[in-house]
Amino acid sequence: MKWRVVFFRSAEKELSSLSSEGQVRVGRAIRRLETEPVPAASKRLRGREEFRLRVGDYRILYVLDAGNKIVKISAIGHRRDIY
């Protein structure tokens, strides 16, 4: 089953501000979320409803809407800045 991926406006801006190599790597990881919304490399953040996915030095923060099969990307950034 495919999940639909949607971006918060701030996450779109953060993605576009990454280097071209970072955009490619993060883009691949986001496309994989369509088929596997909770991959083995993801973790649920403590005290929050978000998950984080590690992509090298970058992190993708997202929320799942299981009822509607939607992955909502809330933030994308370097690990030192994302939390």
Image: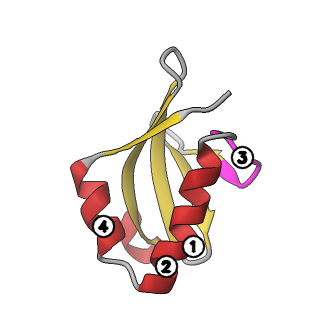
Residue of label 3: 39
The magenta stretch spans residue 40: yes
Q: Residue at x 36, y 72 (%)?
A: 81
Tell me the residue at 40%/62% (across/down). Answer: 76
Looking at the rendered structure, the kind of residue marked 2 is Gly
Residue 32 among those drawn in magenta: no
Residue 25 point in image, percent of width and height: 57, 73
Q: Secondary structure at mark 3?
A: loop
Query: Marks 4 and 2, how far apart in space?
Result: 11 Å
User: Could you tell me how far apart the alpha carbons at marks 2 and 1 are, in whole angstroms?
Assistant: 5 Å
Relative horizontal placement of residue 34, taking residue 75 as reference (left or right) = right
**Type of the residue with mark 1:** Arg
Dot 4 or dot 1, earlier in sequence: 4
The label shown at residue 25 is 1
> What is the span of residues highlighted in magenta in the rendered image?
37-42
Q: Is residue 59 above or below residue 39?
A: below
Question: Tag 1's secondary structure?
Answer: helix
State the residue position of label 2. Answer: 22
Sequence-wise, the earlier of marks 4 and 2 is: 4
Whole-Å distance between the Cαs marked 4 and 1?
14 Å
Discs 4, 3 touching: Cβ within 8 Å:
no
Q: Where is mark 4, residue-wise?
A: 14
Q: Residue at x 58, y 53 (%)?
A: 31
Categorize mark 1 by other alpha carbons within 10 Å: few (<14), some (14-19), many (20+).
Answer: some
Secondary structure under the numbered disc 2 in the rendered image: helix
Structural distance between the alpha carbons of marks 3 and 1? 16 Å
Q: Give residue 66's position: percent from left, percent from top.
A: 54, 21
> Three-letter amino acid code at disc 4?
Glu
